[in-house]
Amino acid sequence: MKILSQLFLSLICILFTSISHSFDCENHVVSSQELKDGKFAKLYVPVSKIVSAPRWDPVSNKTIISISEAAMFFKEWAEINLNDYEAKIVHTIQATKFSCWSGEYGKYKNNGDYWFYIIQYHALTFEPRNVKEGNILALLMSGEIIEPIVEDYY
């Protein structure tokens, strides 16, 4: 009986460890898009980068980066990273509150609001017609842009 209880306790510990790793805020996916080949463009925003960027309180109306400034950040990024595409168009700029506070980063949860922008865009060429996939970015309130990583679903 003692061996069974130790085995059960070991299994519980393994299960808890695997569950806690699945809620790792350093690998927190905030957005993803399925690509034609079945892979996914996943946008990871690590909490370590979020807490090093300025906080924003949307009620105060004192923006750190305005929507028009976010569009300019995208334009500057696109000129460098999308120079093979003729059209580079912002589709949406969405203010998003960061909401993953597990593990050691739980201490930041009550320190105010941490926000970032998710930018969705279109990039294409006309002759020959080519449309870029995985068109999502994160813009932190520090001005840092984070690009998606293409991987399998799991």
Image (cartoon, rainbow, N blue to C red):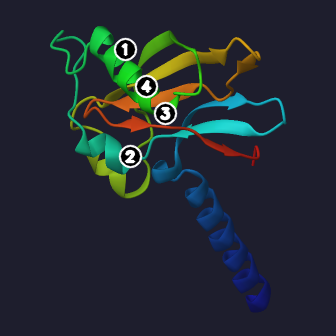
Q: Nearer the viewer, mark 4 or mark 2?
A: 4
Q: Which picture quadrant has residue 80?
A: top left
25 up-or-down from 87: above or below? below
Q: Amino acid at mark 2?
A: Val
Judging by the rendered image, the residue that carries numbered circle 2 is 47
Q: Earlier in the sequence, mark 1 or mark 4?
A: 1
Q: Residue at label 3?
A: 81
- Sequence order check, earlier mark of 4 and 2: 2
Q: CA distance from mark 4 to mark 2?
A: 28 Å
Residue 6: quadrant of the picture: bottom right
Q: Determine the secondary structure under disc 2.
A: helix
| Cα–Cα span, label 2 and label 3 | 25 Å
Badge 1 crowding class, 10 Å Cα cut-off, few under 14, some 14 to 19, many 20 or more, is some
Q: Which residue is mark 4?
A: 79
Amino acid type of the residue that numbered disc 3 sits on in the rendered structure: Asn
Instruction: Classify 106 as above or below 83.
Output: below
